[in-house]
Amino acid sequence: MVTFLAGGTGTPKLLDGASEVFDPAETTVVANTGDDVELGGHLVCPDVDTVLFHGGGVLDTERWWGIEGDTTATDDELHRLAEAAGLDGGPRYLRDEAQVSGRDISRWRRFSGVAEFMEIGDKDRAVHLTRTSLLDEGNSLTGVTRTLADAFGLERELLPMSDDPVATIVHTDEGTMHFQAYWVHRRAEPRVEEVEFRGAGEADPTDAVLGALADPVVVGPSNPVTSLGPMLAMEAFGDALDSTPVVAVSPFVEDRVFSGPAAKLMDGVGLDPSTRGVADAYPFADAFVLDSADGTDLDRPVVRTDTRMDGPEDAARVARAVESALAEVS
């Protein structure tokens, strides 16, 4: 048995070839939910859905977001209506009192659906509508995720990191904003001054997650701040990682990041934007997989390979390196 921690696109890309090394039936994926937003009343779980759509064979792997070939008729019409009515586009946060009333799982991250700032495909929207409706019927996010996983025919078990809300809030030189507003709308342009995981002090990983963390854990080449940060902000989650073998794949080659805003976010929270900074962020990691061109000297076992992943064959190569690293620390 093995458990992958997933956020952003790094771990899903690794999973693209991991089935050649790790039996999907004995693999659990724990997905970050700090990036979730409620948009126009529908709960959108980007990191959960990337794994869900990938496992169901429908992920748009050009963008690593949404459903391949999806139409956007509703999104297009929302923007047309807003423009015709003279309504401002961009993220439209609901008023403060609306952020914490009603559905607990969506606290601190509610946006109006007017001219929605995240493009949601029509089939994609049906997933969010189903998820939100099942939550409103009284189901937990874990239970709803399992229902959706069954609908998409996933072979791996997929778990949200918690049934409690944790919101990733980025404090910048241009104001405070939810991570999705910072990344999707502002394209990571503002300078990061601090990252807050709102609600983490009151959130707990589920029993299912804690059970999965008792198995060896793989941290994919995800963003240490906003993909893993919300998980690690829950005390019980970090404690569990201290007690199990953990291998992490660096998203950097020394100080060069493969993709995404990891470097800006790490710099903003006082971590060196590099493989060494990743190691500092992961004191629980027992071994690392680094790129062959990464000469960073770490105080833990290291397995090196070409860590660029442009397809399943690349991902399988990295997964084999992960297997070798786990063998050294298990």
Image: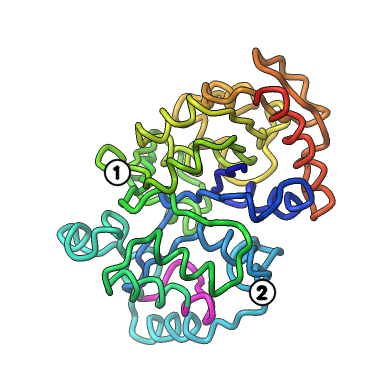
State the scheme by which the image is colored. rainbow
Residue 315, position as x, y percentages in the image? 77, 48
Q: Nearer the viewer, residue 34 or 288?
A: 288
Question: Residue 146, percent across and down?
Answer: 47, 64
The residue drawn where x is 41% and y is 41% is 230
Q: Is residue 288 above or below residue 35?
A: above
Which element is circle 1 on?
loop
Q: Mark 1: which amino acid?
A: Ala
Tell me the residue that label 1 is attached to: 203
- Front residue of this view, candidates 9 and 178: 9
Residues at circles 1 and 2 in contact by the CB criterion of under 8 Å: no
Crowd band around label 2 with a 10 angstrom C-alpha radius: few (<14), some (14–19), many (20+): some
Q: Which residues are magenta?
A: 114-126
The chief SS type of the magenta part is loop
Residue 171, picture quadrant: top left
| Residue identified by numbered label 2 | 68
Q: Is residue 256 above or below residue 151?
A: above
In reply to whether residue 147 is colored magenta, the answer given is no
Q: Residue at x 31, y 40 (%)?
A: 200
Which image quadrant: the C terminus?
top right
